[in-house]
């Protein structure tokens, strides 16, 4: 069983339920001797912090063999370092020890708690991923981080430099399998138009979701995570 965590890209913004890459992946795995179930738990607007909390509180009850964290490089670190996102209060991790703040979460319209929030969105994101890796190891499942986002701003030098630094940072983590979709897009000559066709907010088209399913499937086979 594969549990997929993510935001609107996983939730399937702009496409039908049967066109989301998780459904396509499950179909690709249907003919294997050992059947696989792919569980989509994407929620639009969630950060990796909320995804980790969901994994602990509910996701592990599905007894996944593999957990795929869909990491949107452009805005997930911002989501992970703020107590209010899209006008709504949310929980937030305050430090590398993953001390939780803004709980109980204030109701809509109420002010968030006064907190000293993480100084670096990137460092708190790494801490969240390490925490997720630890949770997966303790529960006998493998963590795959599937990163993407540079494809949306391919000509932005700041994004390119941040991507380079991020790939160095994530190499410090242990116990994860790392799929850099942006690198795969480049290696295969795929551009934004092949994935989004200018869909609102650069979300993937059905064809884009099919590409993601193919790349993820190939990665899982290459790493021998699926039998």
Image (spheres, rainbow, N blue to C red):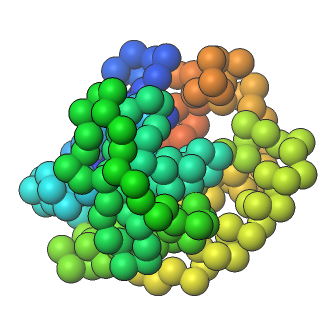
Instruction: Give percent across and percent down for residue 126.
Output: 51, 71
Q: Position of residue 22 (x, y in %)?
A: 37, 38
* Side of 143 relative to 187 (left or right): left
Q: Residue at the spot x=42%, y=48% of the render? A: 83
Residue 51 at x, y = what percent? 33, 52
What residue is shown at x 35% (from left), y 21% (from top)?
Answer: 18
One can see residue 3 in this view: yes
Q: Quadrant of the N terminus?
A: bottom left
Question: Looking at the picture, does residue 68 appear above or below residue 39?
Answer: below
**Location of residue 88 in the rendering, given as x and y in whole percent from the top left corner:** 38, 33
137 vs 101: above or below: below
Kindly identify the residue that appears in the image at 69 percent across and 76 percent down.
168
Q: Residue at x 83, y 61 (%)?
A: 161
For this view, does 133 lie left or right of residue 62? Answer: right
Above or below — where is 203 with respect to 105? above
> Which residue is most to the left?
61
Within the image, what quadrant is residue 132 found in? bottom left
């Amino acid at each position: 069983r594969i549990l997929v965590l993510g935001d609107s890209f996983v939730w399937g913004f702009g496409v039908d339920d049967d066109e989301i890459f998780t459904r396509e992946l499950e179909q690709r795995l249907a003919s294997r001797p050992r059947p696989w179930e792919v569980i989509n738990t994407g929620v639009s607007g969630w950060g990796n912090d909320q995804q980790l909390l969901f994994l602990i509180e509910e996701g592990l009850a599905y007894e996944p063999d593999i957990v795929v964290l869909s990491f949107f490089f452009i805005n997930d670190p911002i989501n992970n370092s703020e107590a209010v996102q899209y006008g709504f209060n949310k929980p937030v991790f305050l430090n590398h020890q993953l001390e939780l703040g803004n709980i109980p979460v204030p109701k809509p319209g109420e002010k968030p708690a006064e907190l000293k929030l993480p100084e670096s969105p990137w460092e708190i994101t790494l801490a969240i991923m390490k925490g997720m890796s630890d949770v997966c190891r303790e529960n006998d499942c493998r963590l795959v981080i599937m990163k993407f986002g540079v494809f949306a701003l391919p000509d932005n030098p700041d994004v390119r430099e941040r991507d380079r630094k991020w790939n160095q940072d994530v190499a410090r983590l242990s116990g994860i399998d790392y799929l850099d979709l942006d690198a795969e897009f480049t290696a295969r000559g795929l551009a934004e138009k092949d994935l989004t066709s200018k869909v609102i907010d650069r979300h993937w088209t059905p064809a884009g979701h099919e590409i993601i399913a193919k790349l993820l499937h190939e990665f899982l086979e290459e790493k021998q995570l699926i039998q």
